[in-house]
Amino acid sequence: MITLAAETNPLVPPLGELVIGLICFLGLFAVLAKFAFPNINRTLAERTDKIEGGLERAAQAQAEAGELLEQYRAQLSEARLEAARLREEGREQGSAIIAELREQALHEARRITAAAQAQLDAEREQAIATLRAEVGDLSLRLAERIVGESVTDEARQSRIIDRFLDELEVERL
């Protein structure tokens, strides 16, 4: 038995098994090549297309997102410029309104001052007229006492009063 084991190599299969294994392998390969490999290749191609299509769609979506981001930034920039313009316009309008209100206030103050001055002038003229009448009356009484007779002539009274008042004004100056 020792001789028999030495003659056969356990690593090399017998030739009959090799032929049967090769025929089975080729049959199995033919069946797989005919039915399974086309389905596998089609599935792999579909997956490749899906992956490549997904990458393309992702690239398109990223490009669209980039465009949208640029549009958003442009709109934001425009909105900021518009806000700055509106603030400046508001300031200008506020300044114009303040200037207009100041002008109206000055005009009203001038009108009130002019009316007050006119009223003062009228009251002053009235006071002067009243004082003239009283001073004239007093001067007539004084003149009657000094002269000792009644001064009843109106033209004469008026001349005496005017002369007396003129002398007072000359003395005052």
Image (cartoon, helix red, strand yellow):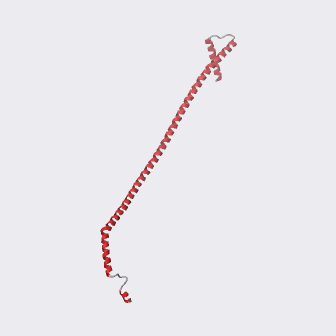
* 49, above or below 147, in the image: below
Quadrant containing the C terminus in the rendered view: top right
Q: How many marks?
A: 0
* 125, above or below 108, in the image: above
* 161, above or below 108, in the image: above
Q: Residue 18 location, x and y as percent? A: 32, 79
- For the point 41% across and 54% down, the residue is 65
* Residue 54 is at least partly visible in this image: yes
- Determine the image quadrant of residue 33: bottom left
* Residue 166 is at least partly visible in this image: no
- Determine the image quadrant of residue 114: top right
Q: Residue 113 location, x and y as percent? A: 57, 29
Residue 74 placement, left or right of 114: left
- For the point 41% across and 52% down, the residue is 68
Quadrant containing the N terminus in the rendered view: bottom left
- For the point 38% across and 59% down, the residue is 54
Which sits in the foreground, 56 or 139? Answer: 56
Residue 89 placement, left or right of 156: left
Q: Residue 158 location, x and y as percent? A: 62, 14
Which sits in the foreground, 86 or 124? Answer: 86
Which sits in the foreground, 133 or 61? Answer: 61
Please, which residue is most extreme toward the front here? 1
Q: Residue 66 location, x and y as percent? A: 41, 55
- Determine the image quadrant of residue 105: top right
- For the point 49% across and 41% down, the residue is 90
Which sits in the foreground, 50 or 100? Answer: 50
* 134, above or below 69, in the image: above
